[in-house]
Image (tube, rainbow, N blue to C red):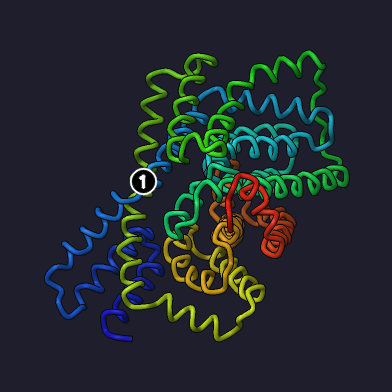
């Protein structure tokens, strides 16, 4: 531990304790490191060069603003209502129907937004209002919305998977395909639990739909559902790259909102562009800061040190995966998902490589792990988003969220120790682990 490294760690810990945004925390820690270094003259130039050069060299990052743009369009137009009506017709008169619709809606929107927060604050807001009006308790309403939003980054597209691909070099297309089956397993698990609890608590039934009504709603939803086909079909067939698919899907989402549903004007477009720029700017600064942070981590050989410590504990890859999962679950209770992705994943990747663990399998598992953190007390962002939108007491949301978290952790370890559940679909498309 040399003086610059001590300054680096201490300043980062202080930034974290003071709750300074993680991007600024990483950037300031990097600057303090170089100031404390033997030749601090080029501090600002060095950090700025790493920030800009690395940001400009990653083509895959262009997919992020495209996915954000697509999500903003979907959340600002009629598409949310149309998918909600179609999901309601699918569920029909089942007990606890609105809770089931909440989950199905998230599965569908997962193929469009790639963001858990976008799911919870967009369609999730409408779903929570409908559930509260139907008499569901505020705690359960928020819990099922937070739980279902977890699927956003598991079923492709996935913004966290884009960042993981950038850090690990794993195929983004294979990662997207690897998330499909786990996402469906997660959704089915939630639906089974909701079905059981709905009978136990005598939740209200949904509305009845005739066959004709179902067909009308299905036909009306086809343009929106085709967004998923455009996005995933282009990637899976190899016609376009994930970044190009994001551009195509965003264009299609804009087209159907304007032409098919006539629910998108110039004012809406301005709001969408403004929100997209704000979100992209925040993420871009975060990623640029992470590059400077990671550069220091690399030159100080911190990943090698972490690898030696972990490999000194065990050389069994199954035990290692258990240790890593537990560590990341604990981190997720206290630290933001993007901070975990950008700071801690680069430290653990050399261990995964040395033990022969497939990076696509590990990527899907670790993204699910981090998504669980979004709903885990004390700092789970989805808990605060849903309770803030409804006014529900946080303690009630946490109480109702606990069974979902237990189920999620069960699915997490199932995927961890049965890799074929993740790798089956990528292998079908030609991926070779």
Location of residue 276 by image quarter: top left
Circle 1 — which element?
A: helix
Q: Is residue 23 left or right of residue 233?
A: left
Q: Nearer the viewer, residue 43 or 54?
A: 54
In percent of the image, x 60 and y 36: which residue is there?
109
The image shows residue 360 at horizontal and vertical percentages of: 56, 57
The image shows residue 168 at horizontal and vertical percentages of: 46, 60
Q: Nearer the viewer, residue 116 or 46?
A: 46
Residue receiving disc 1: 59
For the C terminus, give its image quadrant: bottom right
In percent of the image, x 46 and y 29: which residue is there?
248
The image shows residue 339 at horizontal and vertical percentages of: 44, 61
Observer able to see residue 170: yes
Observer able to see residue 142: no
Q: How many marks?
A: 1
In percent of the image, x 26 and y 57: which residue is there?
51
The image shows residue 91 at horizontal and vertical percentages of: 78, 31
**Local crowd size for mark 1, using a 10 Å CA cut-off: few (<14), some (14–19), many (≥20):** few
Q: Is residue 280 left or right of residue 162?
A: left
For the N terminus, give its image quadrant: bottom left
Location of residue 42 by image quarter: bottom left
Q: Is residue 19 above or below residue 355?
A: above
In percent of the image, x 61 and y 32: which residue is there?
126
Location of residue 228 by image quarter: top right
Q: Is residue 295 above or below residue 184?
A: below
Q: Is residue 40 left or right of residue 203?
A: left
């Amino acid at each position: 531990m040399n003086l610059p490294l001590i300054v680096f760690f201490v300043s980062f810990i202080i930034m974290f304790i003071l709750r300074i945004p993680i991007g600024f925390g990483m950037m300031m820690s990097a600057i303090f490191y170089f100031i404390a270094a033997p030749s601090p003259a080029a501090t600002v130039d060095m950090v700025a060069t790493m920030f800009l050069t690395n940001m400009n060299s990653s083509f895959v990052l262009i997919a992020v603003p495209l996915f954000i743009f697509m999500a903003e369009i979907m959340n600002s137009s009629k598409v949310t209502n149309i998918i909600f009506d179609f999901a309601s017709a699918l569920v029909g008169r089942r007990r606890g129907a609105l809770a089931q619709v909440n989950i199905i809606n998230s599965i569908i929107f997962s193929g469009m937004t790639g963001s858990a927060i976008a799911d919870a604050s967009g369609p999730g807001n409408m779903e929570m209002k409908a559930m509260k009006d139907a008499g569901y308790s505020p705690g359960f309403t928020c819990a099922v919305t937070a739980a279902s939003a977890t699927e956003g980054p598991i079923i492709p597209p996935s913004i966290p998977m884009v960042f993981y691909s950038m850090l690990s070099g794993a195929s983004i297309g294979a990662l997207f395909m690897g998330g499909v089956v786990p996402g469906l397993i997660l959704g089915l698990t939630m639906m089974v639990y909701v079905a059981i609890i709905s009978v136990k608590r005598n939740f209200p039934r949904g509305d009845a739909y005739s066959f004709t009504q179902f067909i009308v709603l299905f036909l009306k939803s086809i343009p929106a559902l085709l967004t998923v086909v455009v996005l995933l079909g282009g990637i899976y067939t190899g016609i376009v790259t994930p970044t190009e698919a994001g551009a195509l899907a965003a264009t299609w989402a804009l087209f159907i909102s304007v032409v098919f549903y006539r629910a998108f004007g110039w004012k809406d477009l301005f709001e969408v562009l403004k929100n997209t720029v704000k979100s992209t700017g925040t993420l871009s600064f975060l990623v640029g800061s992470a590059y400077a942070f990671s550069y220091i981590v690399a030159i100080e050989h911190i990943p090698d040190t972490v690898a030696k410590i972990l490999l000194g504990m065990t050389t069994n890859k199954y035990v290692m995966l258990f240790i890593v999962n537990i560590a990341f679950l604990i981190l997720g209770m206290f630290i933001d998902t993007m901070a975990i992705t950008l700071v801690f994943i680069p430290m653990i990747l050399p261990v995964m490589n040395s033990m022969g663990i497939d990076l696509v399998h590990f990527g899907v598992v670790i993204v699910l792990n981090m998504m669980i953190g979004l709903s885990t007390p004390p700092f789970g962002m989805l808990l605060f988003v849903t309770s803030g939108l409804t006014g529900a007491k946080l303690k009630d949301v946490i109480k109702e969220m606990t069974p979902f978290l237990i189920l999620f952790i069960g699915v997490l370890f199932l995927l961890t120790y049965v890799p074929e559940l993740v790798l089956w679909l990528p292998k079908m498309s030609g991926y070779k682990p």
